[in-house]
Amino acid sequence: MKVKNMTQTQIKIIESAISLFAKHGFEGVRVDALAKEAGINKATLYYYYKGKQEIFEAALKYKFGKLVTTLHQTIDTESDPTSQLKLYIVTMLQREKTLVELMSREILDGGVNIPKDVFALIIEIANVLITIINKGISLKQFREVDPFMILDVLIGAANHYIISSSIREKFKQNRAKDHPPCPQYDIQTYAKMLHQMILSILKDK
Amino acid sequence: MKVKNMTQTQIKIIESAISLFAKHGFEGVRVDALAKEAGINKATLYYYYKGKQEIFEAALKYKFGKLVTTLHQTIDTESDPTSQLKLYIVTMLQREKTLVELMSREILDGGVNIPKDVFALIIEIANVLITIINKGISLKQFREVDPFMILDVLIGAANHYIISSSIREKFKQNRAKDHPPCPQYDIQTYAKMLHQMILSILKDK
């Protein structure tokens, strides 16, 4: 990850690539579209990257690298695993929508386009949570639970929250008149509920 | 929903359409491919359906109609809202992978291809859960909670569980050696955890 050494043009290529891959998936994007979206010509694009696969890899490394840094910085502001879990949930709910869309499409494609070193970053993101859980276990605050099960619920609920904002709006407009009014919920409200749910499993006797 | 009146050919068209839409999304599928996948010629396909949009609509109505029936039949075997919630979760985790993949792609596309009467079926699926929660509230077993928040966690966690099976395998193979071994979890184990999590919110004092 040599983020420091990236030029403004490279960052522009990457940001516009993320939004295209988010919309159309890896297979649905061509180099022409990547250059056009970034507002550069193909020669400039090829000066920096060999092609689509390299841009995809650079974009994911850049974004996931930033997320790993943010997660560590945020979680290090607390030492108690219960509080750290809350910060992890909030940070995951605050991810950019385009990145979550891109990854959701990749999950649907079985992760075939994810290169090995990007996968290592995803593992690192998971490991931040697993470390929090293991710390809670060793401090006898949490019981022994399969951390991957917790991860699946957390990622599933967080990704769904982020990608389904427009469907959720339609839903609310179409619900039956005899149902009680539903309060709107924001990231903090949703995070609080998810935190309480996960703690109910981790602190169960 | 005239499922009874559907011919074997129509069911064949619909089943193969679901698997194509699941893989490529609505935009990524052409009528030629639909006919080929169903093993029929285009003339036969056009005898039954006007085109892609009509097949998409028929397929979703057929599948969601079946899911609504299954949900009602399953839940009606219990009367207690806590038990009914468990049955709802298990049924949602047992949905066909291709249907969940198709819907996940639709959510990513903002639901633009979902026709109004399919949307009504999706609302009905949501309403089964909302009815269970409202029953629990009126029996003073559950406290007042925004049912859409519960729905988001449940659908998010269930969809993720279903669509991420191959990514999950990669994950387990790539995890660090110093982590404790993780038990495999099946639908029943995952359902039990989700049930407990959701009850911790619904029964919170």
Image: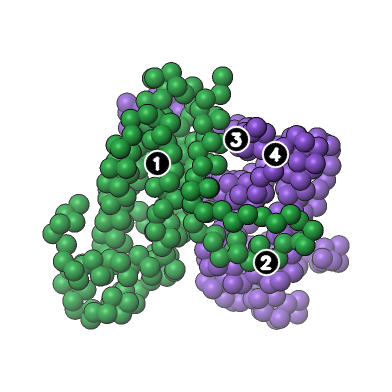
Chain colours: A green, B purple
The residue lying furthest to the left in this view is: A5
Residue located beneath label 1 in the image: A87
Q: Quadrant of residue B83?
A: top right
Residue located beneath label 2 in the image: A173
> CA gap, disc 3 to disc 1?
19 Å
Q: Amino acid at mark 1?
A: Leu
Q: Chain of mark 1?
A: A
- Tag nearer the camera, 3 or 1: 1
Residue A150 drawn at (x, y percent): 49, 36
Residue located beneath label 4 in the image: B143
- Quadrant (top left, top right, bottom left, bottom right) of the C terminus of chain B: top right
- Quadrant (top left, top right, bottom left, bottom right) of the N terminus of chain B: bottom right
Residue B202 drawn at (x, y percent): 67, 38
Q: Secondary structure at mark 2?
A: helix
Q: Is B55 or A138 nearer to us in this picture?
A: A138
Residue located beneath label 3 in the image: B197
Say if labels 3 and 2 share a chain. Answer: no
Residue at 39% x, 47% y is A91
- Tag nearer the camera, 2 or 4: 4
* Residue A23, visible in the rendered structure: yes
The residue lying furthest to the right in this view is: B4
Q: Amino acid at mark 3?
A: Met
Q: Is residue A102 above or below residue B88?
A: below
Q: Quadrant of residue B111?
A: bottom right
Residue A122 drawn at (x, y percent): 35, 46
Q: Are marks 4 and 3 in contact (CB under 8 Å)?
A: no
Q: Secondary structure at mark 4?
A: loop
Q: Residues within 10 Å of mark 4 (few under 14, many from 20)?
A: some
Q: Residues within 10 Å of mark 3 (few under 14, many from 20)?
A: many
Q: Secondary structure at mark 1?
A: helix
